[in-house]
Image: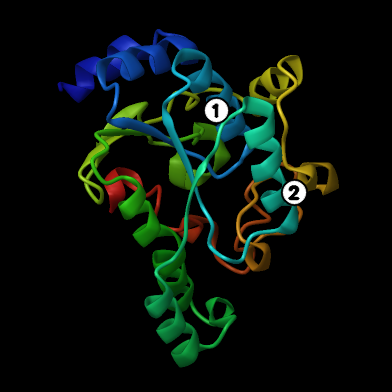
Amino acid sequence: MNLELENIVIQRLSAEDIVQRYITQYKGSIALASSLSIEDQVLTDLVLKIDPSIKIFTLDTGRLHPETYQLIDRTNEHFSTKLDVYYPENSSLEKFVKKNGINSFYESLENRKQCCAIRKIEPLKRALKNIDVWIAGLRREQSLTRSDLKIIDIDTLNQNYKLLPLLNWSEDQVWDYIKKNNIPFNSLHNQGFASIGCAPCTRAVTNPDDIRSGRWWWENPETKECGLHLPKGV
């Protein structure tokens, strides 16, 4: 695939048409990775309208908010589907906690990244086995670390392509779609949460102009990624 040419072509398409294009081309080897964010809820609606059999999975880190677990059930019921749920490999997690402590991610960036690697990156690799394209809900305006992303790009970490159909959407566009289609969303959004991850690492936003200010709030903005979505997986 000529990525430069492909991005020129698809940037003119709607999100629906982008999803349709890749589901048609990669049927059976394409999946949606959902964190249950508002963006991923939009994408769940889009992909299931095109192909009800598409693989949709989420990562249960073991430290999610109760509201997120509730949303998994509400999503399954609303869309008449069953999300695949992937968990951390238990022995690696047990060794990490024994060595570093249950909340050691607060102590150093190294510990936090190692925790994310065990709870997110390794389960993601298992989820993406035999998947050529994975769809994610990243948007350009979400953070500094996402400003240079492309709609379709190579994910060198997982040796496949990553597709971001909502990359150029605004937050208002996402919420408009959610409301118009009556799609369930995490109730924490009604409590000032914008970007929702693990419970110990997520709180309500402190800066309305920075929707990820509630994520890893003790870190600098340029480090606020877990490793799942670094450019080209590096």
Q: Secondary structure at mark 1?
A: helix
Q: Residue furthest right?
A: 191
Q: Position of residue 122 (x, y in %)?
A: 35, 61
Q: Position of residue 234 (x, y in %)?
A: 28, 54
* Number of residue marks: 2
The coloring applied to the image is rainbow
The amino acid on which the numbered mark 1 sits, given as a three-letter code, is Thr
221 with respect to 171 (left or right)? left
Residue at horizontal 48%, vertical 15%? 15
Residue at horizontal 47%, vertical 42%? 57
What is the number of the mark on residue 193? 2
Q: Position of residue 37 (x, y in %)?
A: 61, 40
Q: Which residue is mark 1?
A: 44
Q: Label 1: few (<14), some or many (≥20) within 10 Å?
A: many
188 with respect to 75 (left or right)? right
The picture quadrant where one finds residue 23 is top left
Residue at horizontal 38%, vertical 33%? 31
Task: Work out which quarter of the rendered image holds the N terminus and state it.
Answer: top left
156 with respect to 59 (left or right)? left
The amino acid on which the numbered mark 2 sits, given as a three-letter code, is Phe
Residue 5 seen from this side: yes
Lower position in the chain sequence, tag 1 or tag 2: 1
Residue 210 seen from this side: no
103 with respect to 90 (left or right)? right
